[in-house]
Amino acid sequence: MQAHQALYIPNTRGTLQQLFLLTPKIKGILIFYAVILANLALMFARKHLFENAVLAEASTHISNFALSSMILALMSFIMALQGGTFKLVIYLGLIIIALNLVVETLIRILNTQDLVDALYGAAGVIVTTGIMYIFYQVGINKGNKD
């Protein structure tokens, strides 16, 4: 079995301190990067992918899907490596959905009110929560907790 090395950073006393409690497996890293790269691809290709008249509406909302998904994925990844439970990912997802609803329905500064944007953001959170569940199951080395 291959040994996994933890990431260390220097602390104020000049010694090294372990950055995360847990380390990700290769599968976990691939899952995380796949989520990030898929969302980036959606954002960069939205103008070309959704030229079809049926999908034209999606091109204006796909960035909300991708941003909500990437925020949840990044924060979930960090929480997982710090030893947080999956329940925290669910709570974080609910907070992102609630904030998305507030921003898209109540805040008018630099924003057009659009409930469909909030629904796309909620869809991004739901999809990413499912993917992060898989990450929690197969993507973390749980044996090296201090």
Image (tube, helix red, strand yellow):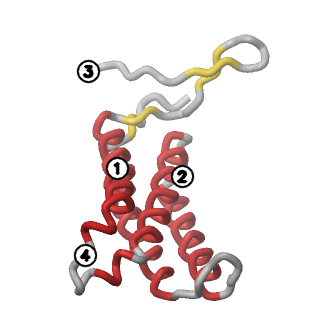
Is the Cβ of the residue at disc 4 closer than 8 Å to that at disc 3? no
Q: Is residue 53 above or below residue 100?
A: below
Which residue is disc 2 drawn over? 75
Q: Quadrant of residue 82?
A: top right
C-alpha span from label 4 to label 3: 49 Å
In the rendered view, does 114 fall on the left or right side of 35? Answer: right
C-alpha span from label 1 to label 4: 21 Å
Which residue is disc 3 drawn over? 1
C-alpha span from label 2 to label 4: 32 Å
Picture disc at residue 51: 4
Residue type (three-letter) at the residue carrying disc 2: Met
Q: Nearer the viewer, residue 104 or 89?
A: 104
Q: Is residue 71 above or below residue 61?
A: above
Q: Quadrant of residue 111?
A: bottom right
Front of the two marks 2 and 4: 4
Of callouts 2 and 4, which one flags the residue occurring earlier in the amino acid sequence?
A: 4
Q: Total number of numbered labels?
A: 4
Picture disc at residue 37: 1
Of callouts 4 and 3, which one flags the residue occurring earlier in the amino acid sequence?
A: 3
**Label 4: element kind:** loop
Of callouts 1 and 4, which one flags the residue occurring earlier in the amino acid sequence?
A: 1
Front of the two marks 2 and 3: 2
Q: Residue at x 24, y 85 (%)?
A: 53
